[in-house]
Image (spheres, rainbow, N blue to C red):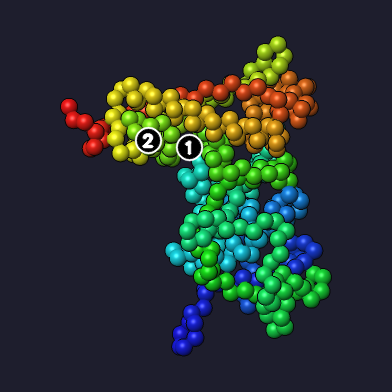
Amino acid sequence: GGGAGAPQPPFLNQVVEARGVSEAVRILGEYSPRVVHLGHLQVVVVSEEVARAGLAPLLDYLTSDRETRRVIQLAVSSCPPRDVLEVRTRLENLPGVSLAEVLRRQPETLGLPESTIIRFLRALHTEGRDPMLPVIHRTSAEGKISERPPGAPEEAERRPGPGGEGQAPGGSREAGRGGQATAGGGGEDPVALRVAGVAVFKDDRMVGTLNELEARGLAWLMGKVQQGLVVVPAPLAGPGPAVLHVARAQARVEPQLTGGSPSVKVRVRVRAGVLEMLSPTYDTTPEEIDRLEGAASRTIADEITATMRRLQKEFHSDVYGFGWSFYRRYPRLWREDLGKRWEEIFPDLPVDLQVKVHIVTNFLAWRSPLGPSR
């Protein structure tokens, strides 16, 4: 970037079109000035169209290639993946490195397990469990998610391909050939990458997505929400809500058989502290703390219920693994009966949910500065 020219980004995005992943990698090597070494591969981003068609061909290549690792992160993009890989964030010069770090931190931010190839395959081949992947979005300077719906037309402008002639984005001169280099700068509206929501799968095919709150409802079920925040719409002597800091969350799922009919008992226990009162006046008396615990319990229960409703009634996808819990407790019954009928049982599986929040009063300002003094 020296001299009078504009600074150049330290990465080059190459686009090729081929009939399979192996052919695309071979063609990519023809245009790349460096050896394409898949041992350096950290993240694989797929579009919603590819995810809905099935990830089996992609997983077959990634697991059979000797250079690739099983800890590669997988993610579904809400917009064309090429747009995600052109976002140059302010803290990281390489979009791939930034995206890899965002995905590695999702156990802390979303409370969900890492989205590696080995975890996806493990869920895919586990009795009574379906896979899931995080959904990656581009965000604007205002923090809004800027995404393009699947199938929407791409940019109209034509950019030069590797050979110099102009061609439309993603186009090819002939089947199995064609490539395009884009030195993404990301200096326009999208300025950051964000993981928000979960792509739900049935076998290897994506069947839908959970939004951010529904994804956290799934994290509550797994007991993985640690160091998170809960906004409780429960006014304490004022119109504003309360913000709780989750110190620990535990979930216990017990499969049960009552008269031969399966059901699930879910017990969620949360230990939290009052972090902030978004109200001009408040008074955290023991009675108000009891009210706040009840309101927080209802808030968490509503998130879990909304998640289960979509998973059971809309997607018919057991990403949590309720079937796996029955398989572990009743292995013989699962092999003889439940496992064969789980597709019919899961949508109407009764779930007895109980959420209990215990608030540790570590909030020093237990009374509002504007409140009455004693």
Q: Amino acid at mark 2?
A: Pro
Q: Quadrant of residue 43?
A: bottom right
Which residue is disc 2 drawn over? 239
Q: How many marks?
A: 2
Q: Does residue 189 lie above or below 5 as drawn?
A: above
What residue do we see at 66% from left, 35% from top?
311
Q: Is residue 358 left or right of residue 155?
A: left
What residue do we see at 65% from left, 75% from top?
181
User: Is residue 162 at all visible to an observer of this figure?
Assistant: no
Question: Which residue is at the front of the view, 332 or 231?
Answer: 231
User: Is residue 80 at all visible to an observer of this figure?
Assistant: yes
Dot 1 alpha-carbon crowd within 10 angstroms: few under 14, some 14 to 19, many 20 or more: many
Dot 2 alpha-carbon crowd within 10 angstroms: few under 14, some 14 to 19, many 20 or more: few
Is label 2 or label 1 in front? Answer: 2
Q: Does residue 147 lie above or below 325 as drawn?
A: below
Q: Is residue 360 left or right of residue 42?
A: left
Q: Are marks 2 and 1 in contact (CB under 8 Å)?
A: no
- Name the residue furthest right: 175
What residue do we see at 51% from left, 60% from top?
140
Which residue is disc 1 drawn over? 225
- Name the residue furthest left: 374
Q: Amino acid at mark 1?
A: Val
Label 1: state its secondary structure: loop
Give coordinates of residue 266: x percent, y percent.
Answer: 56, 24
What residue do we see at 59% from left, 62% from top?
84
Q: Quadrant of residue 332?
A: top right
Label 2: state its secondary structure: loop
Q: Does residue 217 lie above or below 84 as drawn?
A: above
